[in-house]
Amino acid sequence: MTKTFKQAAAAATLACLALPALAADHTIGALFPLSGPNAVYGDVFMAGSDLAVEHINADGMLSGPMSIAYEDSQGLPQPAVVGMTKLVNVTGVPYTLSAFTGVSKAISTLGQRNQVVAVNGGGVGPDLAALGEYFWNVIPLVNLEVRAVVPYLTEEMGLQKMVLVYIDDPFGQAIEGELEAAFEGTEGELVGKFSVPVTAQQFSGVAAQVRSAQPDVVYIASYGAQQIQIVKQLRDNGVDAQIVSYSGYITPDALALPETEGMILTGQAVDYESDDPVTSRFVTDFKAKYDRDPTAYNVNYYNATLLYGLLAAALEAEGKEVTGENLLAKRLEMKTFDLVGGTVSFQDNGTLLSPIEVKQAKGGATETLTTVNVGE
Amino acid sequence: MSRTDPAQGEPLMRIRNLDKSFGGVKAVDDVTMDLRAGIVTTLVGPNGAGKTTFFNLITGNLARDGGEVTWLGRDIAGVKPHRIARAGVMRTYQDLRLFDGMTVWENVLNATEYGALPIPEGRAARLRKRERIERVLERTGLADKRDTRALDLAYAERKFLSLARIMATEARLWLLDEPASGLDPNSYERFLTILREDVAQGVTVCIIEHNLDIVIGISDRIAFLDRGRLLADGDPQSVLNDPELAKIYFGDRA
Amino acid sequence: MLAIQLAITGLQTGALYALTAVGFSLIFGSTRIFHFAHGATFVIAAYFFYAAFGAGWGLIPGILASALGAVAFGLVLDRLVYVPIQRHEGSFFTVFVASFGVGIAVQNVIGMIFGRGFVTVNTSLSRSVELVPGVYVSPLAWIAIACAAVFLAALQFFMRRTHTGMALRALSDNPELVRTFGLNPRRIQAAAFAIGSVIVVPAAIITSATTGLNPAIGHHVMLISLAATIVGGIGSISGTMLAGVLLGLAESLALLVVDSQWTEAVTFGILFAFIIIRPSGLLGRAAAH
Amino acid sequence: MEAYIFNLVNLIAIYSILAVTLNFIMGYAGIYSLAHAVFFGLGAYSSAWVAQHVSPSIFVSYPAAMVAAGAVSLLLALPALRVRGEYFVAASLGLQVLSVTIFSEWKSFTGGIGGVLAIPPVDILGLEVFRPAQFAVLSVIVLVVVLLVINALVHSSFGRNLRAIRDSESAAASFGKNVPMIKTISVVISAALAAVAGALYASYLSFINVESFTLDTSVLVMAMVIIGGTGTVAGPIVGAALLLLLPSVISYFDFLPRTEIGSLQQIIYGLGMTLLMIFRPGGIVGRRSGT
């Protein structure tokens, strides 16, 4: 290697490494699944957060332009920790958006240790409420969904015997625990529980087991591509019981599946008809930008991003530095926020409460059957 | 070096009724013979006579079907090859099996290293070993090639390296599988010299060889194998002059 | 009833495993090339069918596209990767690493083109019908089992009754012998790749309609093929078939005892045990050393 | 910025230890293992468990990790003694897949896919090391120690015995070498030192889960060894640095869509492996093939 080449190479390396320093004035991080079997969620989440950034910048809410540094978590803890390390150490963000239960749990230690706020708008595992003061949730956790749907199934629909098919990860395990608890003291019972590994895609054997348990209703707790395969293969292999799932099932891919027809689903209730300015602006602009109706995930990540805008603007107004520590202090001080869906307040554990809708899939969309207030 | 007992001519290794078949074909069939101290025994016989199998059996590389082999009075049935080697029986291979990725020096040095884990040895012991290897390399004409990888040696050099490895050890019985095949006249003169010197030092040799000059030049005793059976075992003249054996041996050439 | 259902499910899975594994077994047994990219062949065959069928070409053109893709990939790999490596060095590990590299590249290229998620070919054939009360079998299961039987019988016939087949069997033992028959070993090797690649097509297509595809599926396919080849005995085509079916059955029937996350462990536990206890496999002739 | 470089230094040091220890059995003993991530994982889980339940001291948790991995490595030694070549690769694959299942299911020890959270930082005589810069000093020192150990072994009679076995097992036995014993010891040493990498990894990231210890990791480490150069001293480190720098370099090409970076990196390293095997099977550092 010649000397010039070495120098050139060194210079090039330095130039590469120096790039992050040129980032925009207000950069927050995001750990979304951008590739892998859960990539479809990444698109949904980004639709919400990108729109919020557009609005914040258009309004000149902050002293400088805002942007989001996206890292690909693949929806898995390990790549997420690597991405979080980069966001914390290199990009130097004070605030990150997180998604998925396993991801959120994995990065929470780093967030807490480095005083970086992590906000979840997608993962619904109940233990997300207990990840420390730097971990916030702008989504009602799945315990609310389970508590809303079980009485509806047993009482309104008369479906007593349930079988659970769940992914073998923190989220799936959490659902298992919640269902066990929800059935206690009711007429219904959980007659079978079958866990499936994260990477599985072959469910004919599980379907046979489900069938032989003769359930009235089957609860599917998984994500992305896998849950679609489970539903399809259950139906393919002769399971004709009612199928139920949670908010994570409500994605365009899953709703497009013919086998989804008639499924019972739950999710947070968002009043899109509300005439408060934040909600109506969001709904109008979202439809204009993406040419479809927003979903709860779009709302949550819009809200999570907007929350940063509100907090940072308030800090700048006081001349304070925008750090994770100050953002946390400000949130505790402000308490209520005008977000999409109305004025909301955080519980002490950093989690939002919201009413839950029980819906049914019909013709590629969902129809609300009832709305339940599960609040404490 | 004590290579005194047993005395010259006493059996070091006794082989009794040794048997081995491969899928019904008898490769070694009821062979009984002794390998006697200080004596060069040559195994001759046509290809496929079972000579190499015989070596594999007495070094523990193959399990025998029947018979008995004792080394220094001890039965070596089921003893692992490396144990038999450490007890003083070492061999070369017809296809050499050098440690190709290692240098000449490392090949020879490593032949003397038995222990699994490195044992620290004293400076004096190290020096003695070094001298010993130097001497072996000089005698085999490999001194200039000490840092050459075995893979990069010429054919004759590879054959001598195979021999050098065994020379550096303190083995009492050398089993040499066609050590001189393909050597030019100069080389096998060198080979014969080495062998004579070491035999004079008390080494016992059993050798598989086709080259009659070498067989005559060095053997104290000749064992004739054919289709696994030991047809003759005696002094070179009587075996070589037996017309029946000559017919078997040279049959294909006649 | 559950056991019967699981056995039938296992049979279907096993038939697909056998079809996939036999291609690898044929290539490895005859050429001794550790063709780890066999999984990539499967992925290519499956996605070619998915793309062609999805574009409305219909079933037969879809199958042809799939077969063409698989064979072309096998031949190109043989010509551009394996032959050059064999020319300077034959170490199995060099070949294995090269092949592995190709597998990784193919997986990601397919992912960039078709996306990394699951895709499924929709057909009513995957919908099960109740055979006897409590036992459901989908038409595709019958198709899978029939395909396996027909293809494997045809392969056996080919290996035993045709010149090329016999040459393939001879190739692993003695390439010189093949030459003395007046055949070109390189040609025979190419034939092995063509046949070994095309035989994954039925399994790839059926999989695309049952469990669905993703670009990473090749990995699993390859591991199963390797397991079936070794459990069956390297060099034995019928051993591989048998092992493929048995592994499918074992995986499925294991659900009677353990949760589904242990099924993969069952397969590889069997593989591990075979290597330790009986490396020559069920019907293998060659010893491992 | 500095933190970023230190972060890379840490990752390179940790993966270098893995590559160097794999090279020890691959390059010198001819044991082509695709189960190296198992020992990486065992080291990580054991040290994490010890750090959480016994003591986070480096003098307690790291040796514990080494002992655990060394003991389990006997499972890998078993096929290594019985079979060679393709069979051994298949056996190690089997072990790798089995281990991943166990890592996923033995939740009380590994936390399953959810992993082990909040692993305390490593403690060296009362000093808690977790900031990237401090940790870089530790990880580089550990790497150097591992290198010295391996280097001393390779140049001792043990190393020659390993190479002798690689070149001809039967000839090695004919010269008195206890082949099974030597192979077993080499596997145990390799696994125990790989466990040190696992222990570093666990205390550095403070989070571990099964995804870090899958077949993909084993393949990545193997690729590092091969691309760098099997059987060379510098090769594995060069390979580790190269493969870890690759994603960071690619991620600075802004014109590439974010979602394709991972794929592109994989394609580059996949094709890199293939091309290297065709044109330079000895690796970047290795010498050209002898024949």
Image (spheres, rainbow, N blue to C red):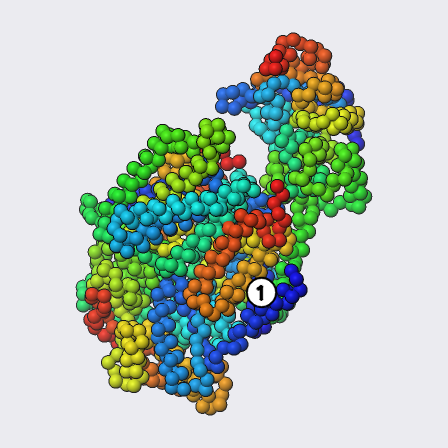
Q: Is residue A101 above or below residue A50?
A: above
Q: Is residue D161 above or below residue A65?
A: above
Give the x, y percent position of residue D171. 63, 35
Type of amino acid under label 1: Asn
Residue in view at x 42 percent, y 45 percent:
C74
- Please rate how many residues cluster around mark 1, counting C-alpha atoms within 10 Å: few if below 14, some from 14 to 19, many from 20: many
Query: Is residue B236 rendered to the left or right of residue A308?
Result: right
Residue in view at x 32 percent, y 35 percent:
C154
Which quarter shows the C terminus of chain D?
top right
The answer to whether residue C232 of the structure is visible from this angle is yes
Query: Is residue A225 rendered to the left or right of residue C105?
Result: left
Give the x, y percent position of residue C128. 22, 49
Query: Is residue D191 rendered to the left or right of residue C264?
Result: right
Give the x, y percent position of residue C176. 50, 30
Residue in view at x 66 percent, y 30 percent:
B92
Please state which of residues A42 and C248 is positioned toward the viewer in this rendering: A42
- Label 1: element kind: helix
Which quarter shows the N terminus of chain D?
bottom right
Residue in view at x 45 percent, y 73 percent:
A69
Q: Is residue B87 above or below residue A5?
A: above
Q: Which residue is mark 1?
A: D10
Query: Is residue B195 rendered to the left or right of residue A59?
Result: right
The answer to whether residue C269 of the structure is visible from this angle is no
Please state which of residues A270 and A255 is positioned toward the viewer in this rendering: A255
Give the x, y percent position of residue D110. 47, 59
